[in-house]
Amino acid sequence: MLRGVFDRLHDPRRPIEPPYPSTKPSKAEQLGDDDPDPRIESDARLLLKHAPPGPCYDNLKNNVATRLMRTKLNAWPDGTPDFVSHHVLRDYIQDTARKCGADSVTIYGARVLRVRKVDDDSGSKWEVTWSTLRQQQQQQWQEERHHSTFDAVVVASGHYHAPRIPDIPGLAESKARWPARIWHSKVYRNPEGFENKNVLLLGAGVSSTDIARELGPVAREIYQSSRNGLFDLPASALPENGIRVSEVESFEITEKGNTADSTLSSDSPLPLIVHLKSGQKLCDIHAIILCTGYHITLPFLPDYHDDETSPADASDTVLVTDGTQVHNLHKDIFYIPDPTLAFVGVPYYTATFTLFEFQAIVVAAVFSGNAQLPEQSKQREEYRAKLAAKGVGRVFHSLHNQEEEYVRDLLDWINRDGAAHGRPPVEGHTPTWLKAKEEQLERMKALFGVPGEKKESSDVIVAPLVRRAHLLS
């Protein structure tokens, strides 16, 4: 098992950002060696590139109750609250890995570079190339490459590592001039440095709203730009000094914008005018955080990427097109053309650990021969029916209000096949889990209304404009 950085493992270092814009998933993890950040020494940069810090910020807590994330392999320590700091989640995962033996077969600090199918004397195999870092006597780090072949590969690389940087007019130029003032939410760690500042957040999802609530007590004004998307949180979740505004149309550098980043005082706002699609303008903004999400990207499977094709036109062999969906998977797990390639953790809006464990159980059942996949034609038929019902893109992998049904379907399949091999049935969600799920839904409704319902356009701007000196009509 090769393992890099666990997304919920907190790292105080800030990751190197991708180029602006970053819209092609196959290149989303390319940080660019042609113009390295002069503030980062070469060794430090190598470490950051090899195992990039994840998006976990200092005060991050889970927003899915721990009772919903209990795996069959390990119980939470007695008295664990429903919502805990990231270090509690880290300890649970590491303890689980030790208890089940995964820790002893894991290569830590490994960066997977390439996965490809090869033929040798023993048949068709997956060749995996990965790298590790070794420190030399002079304290310098050297990359070492390794190769191995496997009968099957499971991809469990997560969603949150390749920032999606939108191609908004003026954004790239603004970032180039003031790199320390504009960055993706993956870089955010804490409210330090935002005291009495006006902050613009692009995006209105969970991360954006959480950051807004963290900045609320220290910032002057917080503007949250929303496209009024299906899974945007309501503006009522913003802090007292937060205001929801419409989607950003462009960034205009003013005549004063020739001031370099090094000479722009920390108290000075950016010499920018932010044009909104509502026709309004924002000025006197000190910092911009792009809470614009992440690409689905498989940089180690470049032959399965096709950046130039829309999701609707995806072929029967491609895995990633525009970075919003993994194509051609049976039940969001098995690659239909070659099910020796499997995925765990693709679905969104789930109880994470629990759902991923059920998927892993299914992979183990199939790879061990205790469950059989349907004929490829049947897999393809089911996949196309799902496409017709759900559509393409991120929503294709959404299990919002469908998680229990999805798990029942998986277990009905492997338990039926497993019985023929004398295997005991795998139990589904426990009564404790189901009760916690019901409580979670009620809590979310009370806080945010019903997630996934389209908001009315009147939800875009909520605060009286007379209180906002920086929002111009």
Image (spheres, helix red, strand yellow):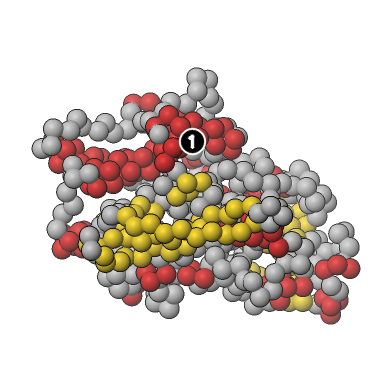
**Residue type marked 1:** Ile
Task: Give the percent coordinates (x, y) of residue 136.
Answer: 65, 54
Identify the secondary structure beneath mark 1: helix
Depth check: give the residue in front, 285 or 467.
285
Residue 308 picture quarter: bottom left
* Residue at (36, 65) in percent of width and height: 116
* Residue at (71, 46) in percent of width and height: 190
Task: Give the percent coordinates (x, y) of residue 383.
Answer: 25, 60
Residue 115 picture quarter: bottom left
* Residue at (33, 28) in percent of width and height: 430
Horizontally, residue 284 falls left or right of residue 61, namely right
Residue highlighted by disc 1? 93
**Residue 451 shows up from this direction:** no
Horizontally, residue 335 falls left or right of residue 107, namely left
Task: Give the percent coordinates (x, y) of residue 159.
Answer: 48, 55
Depth check: give the residue in front, 30 or 46.
46
Task: Give the percent coordinates (x, y) of residue 286.
Answer: 79, 61
Q: Residue furthest left?
A: 420
Q: Residue furthest front?
A: 137
Depth check: give the residue in front, 153 or 418.
153
